[in-house]
Amino acid sequence: MKLARHTLLNLIGLGAPLLVAVVSIPELIRLLGEARFGMLALIWAVTSYFGLFDLGLGRALTQQLAIVLGERMDHQVAPLSFTALSLMTAIGCIAGVLLWLLAPAGIAQIKSLPDPVDAIHATWVMALALPAVVMTTGLRGMLEAQHAFGLVNAIRLPMGVWTFAGPWLIVSWQGPSLTLIAVALTAGRWLATLVHAAYVWRVLPQVRQGWVWDPAWVRPLLTSGGWLMVSNLVSPLLAYVDRFVIGACVSAAAVAYYTTPQEILTKLWIIPGALTSVLFPTFALLIQRRDPGSWVLFDHAVQALFLGLMPISIALALFAPELLGLWLGNADFVTHSAPVMQIFTLGILLSCLAHVPVTWLQSSGNNRPAAMVHLAQLVIYGPLIGWVATHHGLIGAAWVWLLRISVDSLAMFWLCHVRRPAPGMFRRPIRVAVAVLVTLGAYAALDAPMVLRAALVLGLLVAGAALGYRQWRSMREQQARSPAGLADEAVVEPREPLPWVTIVTPVYNQADFVAETVQSVLSQDYPRIEYIVIDDGSSDGSAAVLQRLSAQNPGRFTLITQSNAGQAATLNRGWAMAKGEVLAYLSSDDRLHPQAVSRMVRALQAAPDVAVAYCDFSLIDSRGDRMADVMTEDFSETRLRDHLVCQPGPGAFFRRAVYAKAGGWDANLRQVPDFEFWLRASQSGPFLRVPLLLADYRVHDESASFRPMSEARADEIVTVVRRHICMPDAAPRNHFAMGMALVISAMNHAQSGRVRMAFQRLREALRVHPAIGLQLIVWRRIVSGFFRRSYYRLGSS
């Protein structure tokens, strides 16, 4: 899978420098001394923080450019890129000036610093690197939009190695000069920027055309950044403020004791970082399509991170003193740092898991709640950790850090939980409880003998590997079962020729909505669509709307006007003249999403035996605002023929062979001609659910499914069941289906205000099949009949 391969590339690019850090940091501490090394750690922190001062434009550029490239709008690549990079360059220069001006005052706040002048000069030099740091973010985003993760990591790897190896070499050759270290790091940053730019020029030839400033892109870029900018500014500040507070309240040496284990442990963030940088465009694509598969991917990502990182975190906690002793060889340093490291390991595990919900929220564009959480933390965290560090030292500061990380991680998961379909994030509470208890229980063995600690870690590693393999097998099986399954980055085009698709829209008195319906079909990304619109004798101005649309879009759809014949007869006329190999209809108040046709055709091509393909859809109100999402059921003939659940809704497509065998809609039916058609179509082959939100079903006062109906129309379902399902060789099944038909009739009568008739049909249903009263769906339908209009808030729309 591309997702796994790109994650592995990111892991190598981000993880290999960690090996250099493991070797170089002890030497840097020895050669620089604890105080100077603490200052170097602060320089790294400041540079990293100001590097994120890009107003969210790095992510926004990746997102917007991916869309432009995906839509093949090559003429927009250069203006978008130049505009974004110009903004980011300006921001980088402003950040550099701020760091230059703030350097003397900031350095003055650090206690016990051997050479403050050297520290100020080093900070000034690093200020010169900030334009390069910010520009590199944008250039890297452009490569990621092109999915050039191999190139991204080919550059990232030596740049990351130089971050640690450069200071080590400078100190070894020139002595403990922070200024020379800063010169080396700044030179490396600018070289990386030039290399990124060269590869962008090579990989994206579109950028060579129209390299101009385009003000039209400023708003979309800043809007995409929006609250993400706030999180980008506040999150790093939350991550580094404790170091500055400890430096001001305790000492520079204390910063080294606190920072060294934190620097090593936070390198574990490369694992979720490698994954989520690939998940970001994938989530964005799935969320844009309202694909429930985004939650499947979400769950798999969280589970994989937990199974992989929990044993590592436990091992680092249980063996913190031994590991620090072997690494640093400084007993006094280990005495101060080991307890801090043990506390940090739990927080790092939680924050690694939280990368997934944070990425989901950013991909959805819903960045405001997360930003508000971060702002609230900033108000409380700085003063709290300052007071605790002053009175309780490093251990107290570490516990406050863990508290903040726990609150932040749980908040991110909760923000996703409230946005996903029921039962939400905690649908498996026993598994979650077991994972929490096992993790916390392992920390109880901190003081156990080494043999017991080693056995515990080994057991966790084996269990994690076994469960991880099981999850991997489950994912492979799930993908094999789903022909329309999750895309890595883009859907692969089918090899066979694209068939013609004919969509028919019958129109009767829908002047307020038909323009949206027609435009939704004309906006499809599929190249071979025959669109037939038939005005069935409308008297409300629909004909004028359609004439205007036809004039504005000459040759793009066929417009026919006729005397009123009814929906079924109108559809049959359109399908009879269709040239498409795939047929569909779209009601004149519903809408298709832009990729609906292409996605449904791909699903039919991937499953040649399938007769009908149908998708999930959204409910929208009269204004077009989304009310709810309807996740349809996987096809079941039992559910269709016995429970009378009509699984296909708006956005259903079927093969011409189905129409040829089953015929069109029954023109004598007014209420359930679609259901009766699907019953006949089910004899031509299986149906396939495509689990993507690809259509909108409009709910309003004049919706056929919601307005009052005559007694004859309310009882149509009973007639259809008698005709197609009540066969002599399956009496019990017949009784159940007939009971369900009478329940639906009761619902229809209740919806139309005929309460007495509704209860009469309900009594008939219980008499035909008494056990039907035990079915939950029966009572849901009855309640729906009485309260349907109130539920959908028709009056307020």
Image: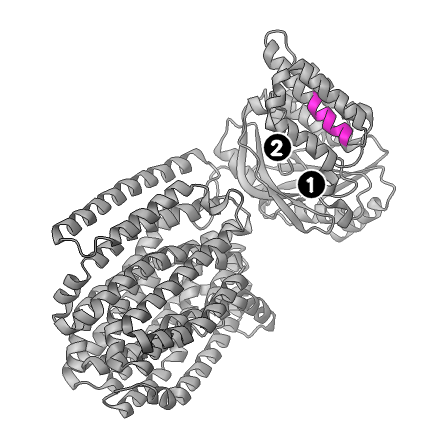
Q: Position of residue 546 (x, y in %)?
A: 79, 46
Direction from residue 654 to residue 187 in the image, left or right = left
Residue positioned 76% across, 39% down in the render: 703
**Tag 2 or tag 1, which sits nearer the N-term?**
1
Camera-side residue: 115 or 567? 115
* Span highlighted in magenta in the image: 742-750
The mark found on residue 648 in the picture is 2
Q: Position of residue 422 (x, y in %)?
A: 53, 43
Residue furthest out toward the top: 728
User: What secondary structure do most residues of the magenta stretch adopt?
Assistant: helix
- Tell me the quarter of the picture where residue 146 sits: bottom left
Residue positioned 85% across, 33% down in the render: 564
Camera-side residue: 331 or 207? 331
- Which residue carries the number 1 mark? 531
- Few, some or many residues within 10 Å of mark 2 (<14, 14–19, 20+): many
Q: Amino acid at mark 2?
A: Pro
Q: Nearer the viewer, mark 1 or mark 2?
A: 2
